[in-house]
Image: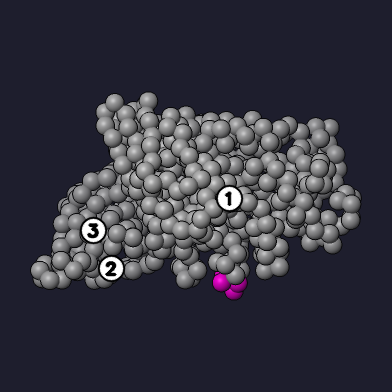
């Protein structure tokens, strides 16, 4: 807990604080009920509100699938003005599907209506070369289920994404990580599933039927990290000498009973089955690929990129892991996102080390190409089969989500969504925070000031305003200041607390706040510089 004198200091400083920091190193292995005290996100109104990205990229002729994310009382009906030729909208579900042939930017007016009102918002549909124009938002199975992932578990997280309303805030992808693979076979001699995934096509259809998208995992070694078959082979016919078959048909080379060590599958074999695998994924209806090995190299990255591009399905291409910085200009060109780090754990040491060391990547980040400091460690995680509640304190979790938003990083929820508690849900459904992550300008937030344990990140937004995170990396409460000079802003600016969704100050100079240990104050400084301001001298 924050010490009493720290709290008084915070109040005297005039900044709102995150009430109660929690002990920075506290272990919380079951859902702590005290977390409900830390919920800052206001409930979404019952009137309709359209959320999520303001821009959406699709390649000409590719299958289009977009669900209008809208909060508010149901039933709700949807319409759209100026939809480009080739697209149609389902009025009940708000799903837009079809194919657009003509390259261009289409400014579409989305409309959502319920018994309490009407909301309108512009969506820019960009038909061209680039996809993932804002960082992908979704779920990935690894941080919760690890190798114990199954079709049933994936489906239950997909259902929760809809039932708990995350889909209404722009959450979209349901990504299966390592652990789905069986042996090669089928029509394309692609990797088939193991017995935990009895019907991958059925799963993909079901996920699409909910208005979501689905992703898959592989790598260009003969095997993957978890010991399943990869996109390359030592044998020309696609058989693997090192694979053992378990009683449950769960194919891996590592036999946990015999405790055989990993290693034999960590090499690039002679025979590539990349095209075969991609064809299989396209047949199943995959929308996202995490391609994982180390070190990432241009040859294998390009080979997969070309295979993906040879189909009329837009598949987000995400590289993993610890991509070498020396080739950043190549990742920028060829991939939609790339892991810049090793694996995250649910500790402050891990999350803060990964999150606060991304600055050198900023020149390579922009719409369609994002850095990925790994998936979120909130809620019930555990790398399977047993889960525990994240060991991050409430303030550390605010830091985690705020920092990933400022960095324009993919937001991939790492917990079992079927067990989402109210606190975690509140962290993931704050539309003003999500808007920082999804801002169409696509800049990576940078350090603009630093003093002691306090570090200030700023991210310029499309509307000329600035998202600012004042982080306290220390173990005791601290005071943080950002000046308009730090931000290159002039004149009167308003300060909005994004977690609380409230305007909290006006100033012509700066903003000062108390910050809880390992915590953050995430604000927006607006409206930014303007001509009006310049001519009026304000
Ligand atoms: C690597 C990746 C993780 C996960 C596992 C799967 O460790 O970095 O994110 O995909 O492999 O085995």
Q: Secondary structure at mark 2?
A: helix
The CA span between labels 1 and 3 is 38 Å
Q: Position of residue 114 (x, y in %)?
A: 32, 29
Q: Is residue 380 visible?
A: no
| Residue at 38%, 55% in the rendered image | 439
Q: Which badge, 1 or 3, is on the more N-terminal residue?
A: 1
Q: Which of label 1 and label 2 is nearer to you?
A: 1
Q: Relative to 77, is 121 above or below? A: below
The CA span between labels 3 and 2 is 11 Å
Q: Which badge, 1 or 2, is on the more N-terminal residue?
A: 1
The residue beneath circle 3 is: 526
The residue beneath circle 1 is: 62
Q: Residue furthest bottom?
A: 326
Boundaries of the magenta span: 325-329
The residue beneath circle 2 is: 487
| Residue at 28%, 54% in the rendered image | 523
What quarter of the picture does the C terminus occupy?
A: bottom left
Q: Position of residue 251 (x, y in %)?
A: 80, 41
385, 404: nearer the viewer: 404
């Amino acid at each position: 807990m924050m010490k009493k004198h720290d709290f008084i200091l915070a109040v005297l400083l005039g900044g709102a604080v995150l009430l109660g920091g929690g002990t920075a190193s506290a272990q919380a292995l079951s859902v702590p009920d005290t977390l409900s005290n830390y919920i800052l996100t206001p409930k979404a109104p019952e009137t309709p509100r359209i959320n999520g990205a303001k821009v959406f990229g699709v390649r000409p002729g590719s299958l289009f699938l977009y669900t209008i994310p809208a909060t508010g009382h149901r039933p709700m009906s949807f319409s759209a003005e100026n939809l480009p030729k080739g697209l149609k909208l389902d009025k009940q579900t708000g799903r837009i599907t079809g194919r657009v042939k003509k390259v261009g930017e289409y400014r579409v007016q989305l409309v959502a209506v319920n018994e309490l009102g009407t909301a309108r918002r512009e969506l820019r549909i960009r038909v061209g070369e680039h996809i993932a124009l804002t960082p992908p938002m979704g779920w990935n199975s690894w941080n919760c289920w690890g190798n114990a992932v199954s079709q049933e578990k994936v489906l239950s997280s997909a259902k929760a994404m809809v039932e708990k309303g995350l889909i209404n805030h722009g959450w979209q992808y349901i990504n299966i990580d390592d652990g789905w693979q069986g042996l090669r076979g089928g029509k394309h001699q692609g990797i088939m599933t193991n017995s935990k995934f009895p019907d991958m096509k059925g799963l993909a259809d079901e996920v699409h039927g909910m208005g979501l998208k689905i992703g898959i995992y592989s790598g260009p070694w003969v095997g993957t990290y978890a010991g399943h078959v990869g996109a390359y082979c030592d044998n020309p016919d696609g058989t693997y000498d090192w694979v053992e078959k378990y009683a449950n048909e769960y194919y891996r080379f590592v036999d946990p009973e015999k405790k055989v060590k990993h290693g034999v599958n960590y090499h690039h074999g002679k025979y590539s089955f990349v095209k075969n695998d991609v064809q299989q994924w396209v047949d199943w209806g995959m929308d996202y690929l995490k391609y994982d090995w180390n070190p990432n190299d241009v040859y294998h990255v390009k080979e997969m990129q070309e295979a993906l591009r040879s189909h009329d399905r837009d598949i987000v291409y995400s590289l993993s892991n610890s991509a070498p910085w020396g080739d950043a200009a190549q990742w920028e060109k060829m991939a939609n996102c790339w892991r810049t780090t090793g694996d995250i754990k649910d500790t402050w040491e891990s999350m803060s080390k990964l999150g606060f060391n991304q600055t050198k990547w900023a020149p390579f980040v922009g719409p369609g190409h994002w850095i990925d400091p790994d998936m979120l460690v909130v809620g019930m995680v555990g790398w399977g089969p047993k889960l525990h509640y994240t060991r991050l304190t409430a303030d550390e979790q605010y830091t985690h989500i705020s920092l990933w938003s400022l960095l324009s990083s993919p937001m991939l929820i790492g917990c079992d969504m079927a067990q989402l508690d109210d606190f975690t849900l509140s962290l993931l459904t704050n539309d003003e925070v999500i808007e920082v992550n999804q801002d169409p300008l696509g800049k990576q937030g940078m350090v603009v000031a630093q003093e002691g344990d306090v570090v200030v990140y700023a991210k310029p937004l499309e509307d000329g305003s600035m998202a600012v995170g004042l982080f306290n990396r220390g173990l005791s409460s601290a005071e943080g200041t950002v000046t308009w000079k730090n931000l290159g802003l002039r004149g009167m600016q308003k300060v909005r607390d994004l977690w609380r969704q409230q305007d909290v100050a006006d100033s012509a100079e700066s903003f000062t706040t108390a910050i809880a240990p390992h915590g953050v104050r995430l604000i927006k400084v607006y409206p930014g510089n303007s001509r009006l301001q310049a001519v009026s001298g304000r």
